Image: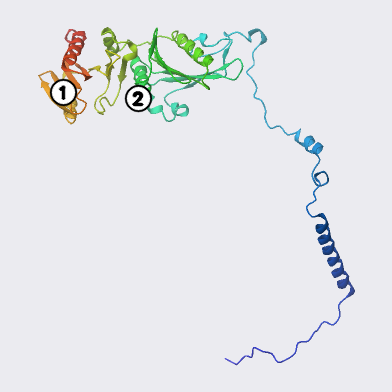
Amino acid sequence: MPHVRLLNPKRRRINRKHISGYEILSSFIILFILAGIVLWAATRKNLYDPARQDISLEAVEEVSSSIVLYKRPFKPWQSSEKANASDDLDVGVFPDSIASDQWRPKSRVKTFDPENLYVKINGEAERFLRHDFKQLSYLVLQSSNQIEEISIELYNQASIAGSSGIFAEHRSPESQVEQDGPNTFFETGIGLIGRKDHFFYRIAGNRSSESIRNKSRQLVQSFSELPAPESAVAFGYQLLQELNIEPADIRHQAVNVFQYDFAKDFWFGKPEKTNQTEVFVHRAGSKDSALQLLTRILEEHQYEYQIIRRTENLVLLQHNFLKSYFIIAIQDLFVFGVDRAEDQDTSFQLLEMIGRALPDETQR
């Protein structure tokens, strides 16, 4: 590789010896403009006149007046002759008495079936379907001042078993359950929840007020006009009523009875409101299936209970920690008993009461 010298001993020379007048003039013009900008910025400092620099307020108003930010929706048309009449309102399955001069339907009734129930209540659809859900009718009532609204969810649960089952899942031990004719309900902070025959309903206002509470109670009376179920009353519901148990204290549990996935279709009732004691009854398809169900329940219960007394058709157990009593028996096709009893005497008294009320399946 040849040796390369980094320093060049030759002197530099200027090849361009003439600068035109055009270049000189352009340079002076640019320098003059820059000097003017610097001088203007130095004299202006922080002086600012909106009237000279901004768009005038009149011009802004003239442009903005043509921009529509909100369009009020059209109201449903009604003839002036029927503006205050409730006969022309299509409220579907709801009784006509739900509408009044102070409360009018805001829109048409919306219906949902098992296929699209999740659209309305996505997180709750499964538990309604477990209780034989058939149809949901949804309606919103609006007050005459257009400030307050009440949403009504009316569920057709096909039978009393379905409505009482879903009602039991909504109520808590602190709920003050009331009975008004065929309606069983309890109040919430903004409405109420209740059931009537095979219907279950939830009423909720957009605020907590006296007018919404009064209207919610009036809706309960209107729901007394709902049609009765086409099917016969379930045997368990009828049986527990014959034992003088209030409808508000009767519930149906379709699945997961006693937290066992194999136990299904049980009816429960509370003979007394003051304690947690419940009686239960289940009708099996055959005597063998009833005996098999009884055996499986006892097998699982022995993990938390100890057997106190056992006969051919009856077993009495006591909880290891709560010390409450659980008694279960079998009679024909029926599996029945008492849960969370305070003492043995109460367990046997209630069990005997249920046994006497059970129908004789051998005569069928």
For badge 2, the amino acid type reads Arg
Q: Residues within 10 Å of mark 2 (few under 14, many from 20)?
A: some
What is the number of the mark on residue 105?
Answer: none
Secondary structure at numbered mark 2: loop
| Residue 284 showing in the rendered view | no
Above-or-below relation of 98 to 9 = above
Q: Quadrant for residue 54, please give it.
A: top right
Which sits in the foreground, 246 or 66?
246
Packing grade of label 1 (10 A; few <14, some 14-19, many >=20) is many
Q: In the figure, residue 324 lies in which quadrant?
A: top left
Residue at image mark 2: 130
Q: Is residue 5 left or right of 277 when viewed as pictured?
A: right
**Which residue is at the front of the view, 22 or 181?**
181
> Disc 2 vs disc 1: which is toward the camera?
1
Q: Which residue is mark 1?
A: 317
Q: In front: 251, or 348?
A: 348
Label 2 to label 1, Cα distance in Å? Answer: 30 Å
Q: Earlier in the sequence, mark 2 or mark 1?
A: 2
Q: Could you tell me the amino acid type at mark 1?
A: Leu
Which secondary structure lies at badge 1?
Answer: strand
Q: Residue at x 51, y 13 (%)?
A: 215
For the N terminus, the quadrant is bottom right
Q: Residue 83: where, in percent of width, then height?
A: 63, 10
Q: Is residue 102 above or below residue 307?
A: above
Q: Quadrant of the C terminus?
A: top left
Q: What residue is shown at x 29% (from left), y 15% (from top)? A: 274
